[in-house]
DNA sequence: CGGTATCCTAGCTGATACTG
DNA sequence: CAGTATCAGCTAGGATACCG
């Protein structure tokens, strides 16, 4: 039984908030890139995420900040400088994500190899009847 | 540095496939409900997920099956019976999700309490200059 | 019972343009 | 540099209807 999700009563769901944010496109990649340096600036981050737009990056960062995973430090200079970094909370999360990555690696099936699906099973039964 | 994601080279990304599936709505809840019983039938599962439609449940289950997290067993009876269950792979994942849940619980901030955001920080600097 | 087929909509996403 | 504003396209998700 997985804790942290409701039993259908609509209660707490501690996971759900983070899950929604992390499930969004780019979130995980942003976190990954943040984990490579202590601090990182907006455009530096953007360059490292080939294909992301300022709009989306900015939005993702805001969401991550709201979830307490990212800290933003603004230097009131011209030109402006903003540095992003991971919070301790995010660093703990990183550990779990690494486990997840290990899990994914462990179970990764070679591309093209498919397990027998229910459809396959059904077909077998049908042809043998 | 989080492993399992590309370095921007477009390579492996073992996590990404699962992540896309798990990030979708209901996926986690389906997994949770599967974890409460050895096997579960379609409509039983549907009833336990108040609000989900057959369309989406079916879709999610197919995705989870493709990711190797769910097994489907079809009994060629009338009326048809289909049983879903978690794979060993999914049971290992469950452990990680529990850790994630513990993490979420640990860092959960009481509703309504907000950390100082960058906007707040900027405002403070501005008013003090 | 256990789905698929179809359609519709909200929201995410990204491109473009602009600003302090 | 570090964003926002605006708009357009697409897709995920859900409602409904139907089928083996």
Image (cartoon, coloured by chain):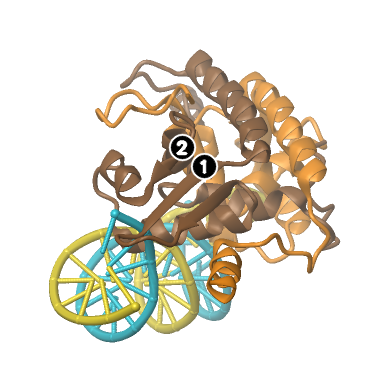
Chain colours: A brown, B orange, C yellow, D cyan
The location of residue C3, given as percent across then percent down, is 52, 52
Image quarter of residue A1:
top right
Query: Is A115 placed left or right of D15 in the picture?
Result: left
The location of residue B77, given as percent across then percent down, is 65, 40
Residue at 66% over, 62% down: B116
The residue pinned by badge 2 equals: A34
Query: In front here: B49 or A53?
Result: A53
Query: In front here: B102 or A120?
Result: B102
Mark 1 in CB contact with mark 2 (< 8 angstroms): yes
Residue at 58% over, 76% down: B127
Q: Let me know if residue B125 appears in the view.
A: yes
**Residue A101 higher or lower than B28, as above or below:** above
Q: Chain of mark 1?
A: A
Q: Considering the numbered disc 2 on the image, is that residue within a helix, a strand or a loop?
A: helix
Report crowding for label 2: few under 14, some 14 to 19, many 20 or more residues within 10 A (C-alpha).
Answer: many
Same subunit, tags 1 and 2: yes
Estimate the spatial distance between the alpha carbons at disc 1 and disc 2, rounded to whole Å: 6 Å
Q: Residue furthest front?
A: B129
Q: Let me know if residue A119 appears in the view.
A: no
The location of residue B17, given as percent across then percent down, is 43, 34
Query: In front here: B91 or B102?
Result: B102
Query: In front here: B124 or B6?
Result: B124
Q: Chain of mark 2?
A: A
Residue at 41% over, 41% down: A40
Q: Nearer the viewer, mark 1 or mark 2?
A: 1
Q: State the count of labels.
A: 2
The location of residue A3, given as percent across then percent down, is 82, 41
Residue at 53% over, 67% down: B122
Between disc 1 and disc 2, whose residue precedes? 2
The residue pinned by badge 1 equals: A85
Q: Considering the numbered disc 1 on the image, is that residue within a helix, a strand or a loop?
A: strand
């Amino acid at each position: 039984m997985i804790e942290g999700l409701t039993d259908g009563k609509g209660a707490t769901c501690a996971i759900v908030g983070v899950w929604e944010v992390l499930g969004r496109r780019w979130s995980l990649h942003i976190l990954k890139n943040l984990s490579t340096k202590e601090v990182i600036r907006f455009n530096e981050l953007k360059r490292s995420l080939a294909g992301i737009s300022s709009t989306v990056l900015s939005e993702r960062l805001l969401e991550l900040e709201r979830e307490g995973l990212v800290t933003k430090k603004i230097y009131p200079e011209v030109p402006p400088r903003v540095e992003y970094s991971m919070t301790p909370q995010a660093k703990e999360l990183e550990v779990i994500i690494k486990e997840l990555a290990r899990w994914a690696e462990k179970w990764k099936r070679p591309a093209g190899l498919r397990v027998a699906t229910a459809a396959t099973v059904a077909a077998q039964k049908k042809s043998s009847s």
